[in-house]
Image (cartoon, rainbow, N blue to C red):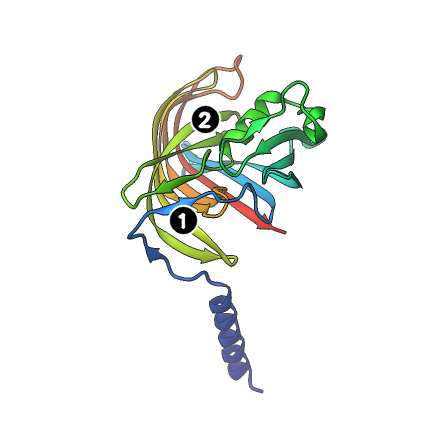
Amino acid sequence: MSARLKRQVLTLAAALSAARCAPVPQAPMTQPVQVMEQAWGPFARQCSTTRLAHYEPHRQLSPREVVSSHTTCIGWSVLPQANGAVELTASMNPDDPTADPIISRILRSPSGASRTAIPGEPGLLAYGSDSPDVATVLARDIGVTARQMVSPNQVLWLPVRLRLPFPVDGAMSCRPGGTVADYGRKVLVLACTLDEQADTANLRARIQLTGEQRVDVDTGVRLSGELTGQLSGQMRLTEGSPWRPADDQVWYSKETEFD
């Protein structure tokens, strides 16, 4: 086989493989969709990444791009309950790579909000969480908080935590655009916008992001998404360090791995 023919065969094989893996094209949403019939699905691991990028001037050379990236991954284990709820044990990587994973324990119901352990809780939840604050954020950020009908023109508010690397919490305004079949599951595609003024110990800035979020219809779990935009204001990495001007491009992504 000639080198040219071999390249053509490899290109065709790659194209066929990509076509098999590509999700079904998005179907426009023309009627309400009920979201959250089950408490959980075959979700094994989720990773979220926030990346900042800006240019620093140089007196002799071209401006230098400075990029910082922070990734948080969570592994999930599940213990089903008789009433359709699930006990979730989440193992999250800490900011310090030499430290032990942070363990959170959450109860998620198919018809109500997720919550963390309470005193006197039976089962695995009785062991509690390593950090109640971290567990509370995870319970809030899993996805929608209750079974509901989502209409084509409805606005959904979904929380999101950005790590810059310090955490900054925001709320996305999302509108449904349609559904796709992904990993054999029906997924609701949302067009989302975040436009907020952050005022924390480390950040005084306006954050403007737009992008797409995907929610699993059966469970209401936010499976994936991508946001891009701008952060403008002031930032400092620690409370004792000086403030610096911040004019950064922001990229945020979330991905779910399946069992």
Q: Is 134 on the left or on the right of 103, as rendered?
A: left
Q: How far across and down, in percent of the image, does residue 45 sit?
A: 61, 44
Vertical comparison of 105 with 20: above or below? above
Label 2 near label 1: C-beta < 8 Å? no
- What residue is rendered at 71% in x and 31% in y? 124
Residue under numbered circle 2? 169
Image quadrant of residue 25?
Answer: bottom left
Query: Of residues 12 and 232, which is closer to you in this image?
Result: 12
Disc 1 marks which amino acid? Leu
Q: Is 235 on the left or on the right of 114, as rendered?
A: left
Exactly how many numbered labels are in the figure? 2
Q: How far across and down, in percent of the image, does residue 98 sit?
A: 72, 31
Residue under numbered circle 1? 188
Near mark 1 (Cα within 10 A), the count class, few <14, some 14-19 or many ≥20, is: many
Quadrant in which the N terminus is drawn: bottom right
Vertical comparison of 38 with 94: above or below? below
Near mark 2 (Cα within 10 A), the count class, few <14, some 14-19 or many ≥20, is: few
Query: Of residues 106 and 255, which is closer to you in this image?
Result: 106
